[in-house]
Image (cartoon, grey):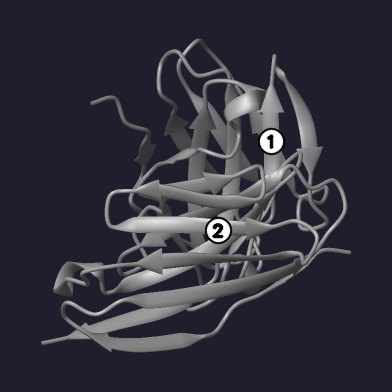
Amino acid sequence: GQSLEQPSEVTAVEGAIVQINCTYQTSGFYGLSWYQQHDGGAPTFLSYNALDGLEETGRFSSFLSRSDSYGYLLLQELQMKDSASYFCAVVGTALIFGKGTTLSVSS
Amino acid sequence: EPEVTQTPSHQVTQMGQEVILRCVPISNHLYFYWYRQILGQKVEFLVSFYNNEISEKSEIFDDQFSVERPDGSNFTLKIRSTKLEDSAMYFCASSDSSDSSYEQYFGPGTRLTVT
C-alpha cells in the first residue's frame, strides 16, 4: 500500500521560516509534489522534486531524499496569506496525497 | 490564465439518486482526473482518464462511479446511486501530459451533499 505522514498542524509568526516534513511509503514512485489549499478550495501546485536535493521557487523550497523516503517544504518570510493547508503528494501513475498540514501564521 | 471549471458548485441530492458532476478541463490538456475530499480530510484520488479511457482508478471508484468525455470539452463523473458517505467535495483536475502529472490544475470543486 501507500502511505504518507506529515504533521497535522504547524503554527508560526509572520516573517518566520517553517518546515513541513513528509515521509512516505509507496511503490511506483516518480517524485514528490506539494500543493497548497486555502479553506477547502482548489489545491494549487507549489513544487515538485523528482531527484534528490533542493528545489527553490521564490519563498518556497522543497527537498527530497529518495533513499530516506523523506521530503520537506520550506516556507520563508511567512505572510498571513500563507495560512492554508499544505499537502505532500506522491507522484506515481496518480497523485496520492498525504493528510495535509494546517499552517497558521499569526502577526 | 486558463483554468479548470466545474458545475454545479453545490449539489444536494437524496440517497439513491443519480448525480452527474461536470468539468471543463484546460483546453490543451490531455489527462483528466477526479478526486474527492471529505470535509476536513485528505484529497483522495478516484480516477484518471486519457484518450477516452480510464488509465487508473482507486479502490473508491467502484461500480457506482463512471466517467465520460461526452464531447471535446466536458469531462463528467456520474454517481449512479448516491449514498450518505458520498457527501464530499469533488475536484476535477487536468494536466497536459503524463510527464507533467505532478503538476495538475484543479477546478474549484463541486460540493455534493447526500441527504
Instruction: Give the answer, above or below, for where B59 lies relative to B101.
Output: below
- Picture coordinates of residue B67, whole percent (x, y): 66, 33
The label on residue B68 is none
Mark 2 belongs to which amino acid? Phe
- Picture coordinates of residue B110, whole percent (x, y): 41, 52
Name the subunit of mark 2.
Answer: A
Q: Looking at the image, which is closer to me, A98 or B16?
A: A98
Residue at far left of view? A107
- Picture coordinates of residue A13, whole percent (x, y): 20, 86
Say if mark 2 contacts mark 1, CB within 8 Å.
no
Q: Residues within 10 Å of mark 2 (few under 14, many from 20)?
A: many
**Residue bearing mark 2:** A63
Instruction: Give the answer, above or below, for where B66 lies relative to A73.
Output: above
Tell me if A77 is positioned left or right of B24 in this view: left
Residue in view at x 75 percent, y 56 percent = A66
Instruction: Give the answer, above or below, for where B54 lies relative to B42.
Output: above
**Quick check: can you spot residue A16?**
yes
Per the image, label 1 sits on a secondary structure element best described as strand
Q: Looking at the image, which is closer to me, B102 or A56?
A: A56
Tell me if A76 is positioned left or right of B13 in this view: left
The mark tally for this picture is 2
**Residue bearing mark 1:** B48
- Picture coordinates of residue A70, whole percent (x, y): 69, 67
Residue in view at x 45 percent, y 33 percent = B23
Q: Looking at the image, which is closer to me, B105 or B15?
A: B105
For the N terminus of chain A, the quadrant is bottom right
**Quick check: can you spot residue A100?**
no
Q: Distance between the Cα atoms at labels 2 and 1? A: 27 Å
Residue in view at x 71 percent, y 38 percent = B66
Tell me if B7 is positioned left or right of A30 in this view: left
Residue in view at x 74 percent, y 42 percent = A30
